[in-house]
């Protein structure tokens, strides 16, 4: 055994995960049990997780009670110490297996809330997964329990348990077999096994599911709590509907803050310190300010046109703000529809067609208003736009049509593009879309003006 231990230790130090995995897979449960309880080997937790699932569970069961306690304490020490999760250490190799249900349950029952966060990091779960929010306040029953024994279990362990509406039936490895409503249990004869009771229809969440996606599924309500299992079906705990709805509120707040052109606030607005608030807002403002410099560059490119037809400068704020406003409108609608699950990547064609028609109609409405405004001002003497005022009106109207159309399409497509490449659509903030529309709007405006006014004012 000592020679094998030294060999495994050398492979650990060399980080030769491929060979180490093969060596551990070849062990029988008794030898594996001896390896994981030997205090001379570092990172026994990693060796244990490289065992095949069946071997790992059998090896743990072969340990004496005090050895089990020591091994669980070893795992707790590694987790508390912030050990890297073994899946991350495999560096491209096949990911290691999950901890057996018995071991995982022993850990979960003895860890604090913060330590459970560290455990799920250690297990390789993403920070946004629903598994990191599991609570241990539930009642588990064995299938061979009678109804009377199940009720005794509830009396014994139910104190302080928040959710007793649903009971969870698990096997010896803590794999979730079925769920039972408390009403079915109370109405059943005392001698009847719980395995014969009618199971309730219950959604089972996987620990790796994204919490935002889970929250979207239960936006309109659901059961008071839902079970969460790992990839092997082990019952990790429960997540309450209240917690799921809290997640949705946080995600909606985060998206709203991002869309407004600021970073997410960790605390509420009233609790966020002034300097922290400035820091969160300054980044986007600087980026947008530098982007708006392109507007000045675009204006400079059309110096000659502005010098020869000063009247064109009068409509610059009107024209470019219309593009930014239409883009912000479209972006807000699409981002919210994505958040609610009303749209997906499969709807790109539908969105494109709808926003194309919307942009044309909105642009035509604003263009008509702009043209009428020039006509009224010219005819009433409020302002003299010169002998070619009609062509100026046409230039403004056509420019508004194309600028609003472009702003609408950009505002609708950018969130979908961000989602396709794996980024948060909410980062397509209103200021960002507006800035993009400003710069491109100027180019469109002066290009259209040049088309209609060359040989006249230009």
Image: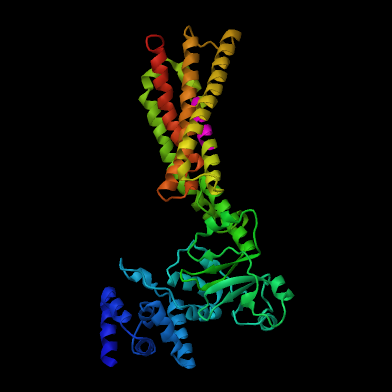
From the top left corner, tell me how far across and down residue 335 is, in percent: 52, 44
The reply to whether residue 97 is visible in this rendering is: yes
Q: Residue at x 41, y 86 (%)?
A: 59
> Can residue 382 be seen?
no
Is residue 228 on the magenta stretch?
A: no
> Residue at 43% of width from left, 15% of height from top?
309
| Closer-to-camera residue (319/91) | 91
Q: Is residue 397 above or below residue 204?
A: above
Q: Residue 91 appears at what percent x and percent y?
A: 31, 67
- Residue at x 38% of width, y 30% of height: 297
Report the front residue among 256 and 383.
256
The magenta segment is: 319-328
Foreground pick, 20 / 457: 20
Magenta span includes 325:
yes
Please, is residue 119 above or below residue 7 in the view? above
Decide which of 97, 120 is in the foreground and name it: 97
Residue pictured at 50% horizontal, 35% vertical: 327
Quadrant (top left/top right/bottom left/bottom right) for the C terminus = top left
Measured as percent of width and height from the top left, residue 321 is found at 51, 30
Where does the N terminus fall, quadrant-wise?
bottom left
Would you say the magenta stretch is mainly helix, strand or loop? Answer: helix
The figure's colour scheme reads: rainbow
Lateral position of residue 391 relative to residue 161, left or right:
left
Spot the residue most to the top.
387
Give left or right: position of 363 versus 201: left
Q: Give residue 286's quadrant in the image.
A: top left
In the rendered image, residue 355, in percent from the top left (x then y), is placed at 50, 33
Q: Quadrant of residue 82?
A: bottom left
């Amino acid at each position: 055994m000592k020679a094998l231990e030294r060999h495994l230790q050398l492979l650990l130090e060399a980080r030769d995960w491929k060979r180490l995995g093969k060596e551990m897979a070849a062990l029988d449960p008794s030898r594996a049990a001896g390896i994981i309880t030997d205090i001379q080997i570092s990172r026994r937790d990693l060796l244990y997780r490289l065992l095949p699932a069946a071997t790992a569970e059998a090896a743990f069961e072969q340990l004496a009670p005090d050895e089990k306690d020591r091994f669980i304490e070893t795992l707790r020490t590694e987790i508390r110490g912030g050990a890297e999760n073994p899946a991350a250490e495999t560096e491209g190799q096949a990911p290691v297996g999950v901890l057996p249900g018995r071991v995982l349950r022993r850990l979960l029952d003895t860890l604090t809330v913060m330590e459970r966060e560290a455990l799920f990091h250690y297990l390789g779960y993403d920070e946004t997964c629903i598994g990191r929010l599991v609570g241990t306040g539930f009642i588990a029953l064995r299938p061979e329990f009678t109804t009377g024994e199940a009720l005794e279990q509830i009396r014994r362990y139910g104190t302080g348990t928040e959710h007793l509406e649903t009971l969870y039936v698990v096997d010896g490895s803590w794999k979730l077999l079925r769920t039972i409503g408390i009403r079915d249990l109370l109405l059943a004869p005392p001698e009847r096994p719980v395995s014969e009771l009618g199971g309730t229809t219950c959604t089972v969440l996987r620990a790796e599911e994204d919490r935002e996606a889970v929250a979207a599924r239960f936006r309109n309500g659901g059961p008071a709590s839902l079970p969460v299992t790992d990839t092997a079906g082990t019952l990790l705990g429960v997540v309450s509907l209240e917690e799921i709805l809290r997640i949705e509120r946080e995600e909606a707040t985060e998206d709203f803050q991002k869309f407004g052109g600021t970073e997410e606030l960790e605390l509420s607005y009233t609790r966020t310190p002034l300097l922290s608030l400035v820091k969160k807002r300054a980044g986007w403002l600087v980026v947008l300010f530098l982007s708006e410099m392109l507007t000045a560059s675009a204006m400079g490119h059309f110096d000659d046109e502005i010098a020869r037809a000063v009247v064109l400068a009068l409509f610059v704020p009107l024209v470019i703000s219309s593009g930014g406003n239409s883009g912000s409108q479209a972006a807000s609608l699409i981002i919210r529809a994505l958040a609610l699950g009303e749209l997906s990547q499969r709807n790109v064609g539908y969105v494109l067609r709808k926003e194309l028609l919307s942009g044309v109609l909105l642009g035509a409405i604003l263009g008509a208003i702009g043209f009428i405004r020039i006509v009224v001002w010219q005819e009433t003497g409020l302002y003299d736009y010169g002998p070619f005022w009609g062509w100026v009106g046409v230039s403004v109207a056509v420019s508004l049509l194309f600028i609003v159309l472009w702003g609408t399409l950009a505002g609708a497509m950018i969130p979908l593009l961000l989602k396709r490449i794996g980024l948060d659509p909410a980062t397509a903030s209103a200021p960002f879309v507006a800035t993009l529309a400003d710069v491109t709007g100027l180019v469109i405006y002066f290009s259209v003006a040049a088309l209609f006014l060359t040989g006249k004012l230009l």
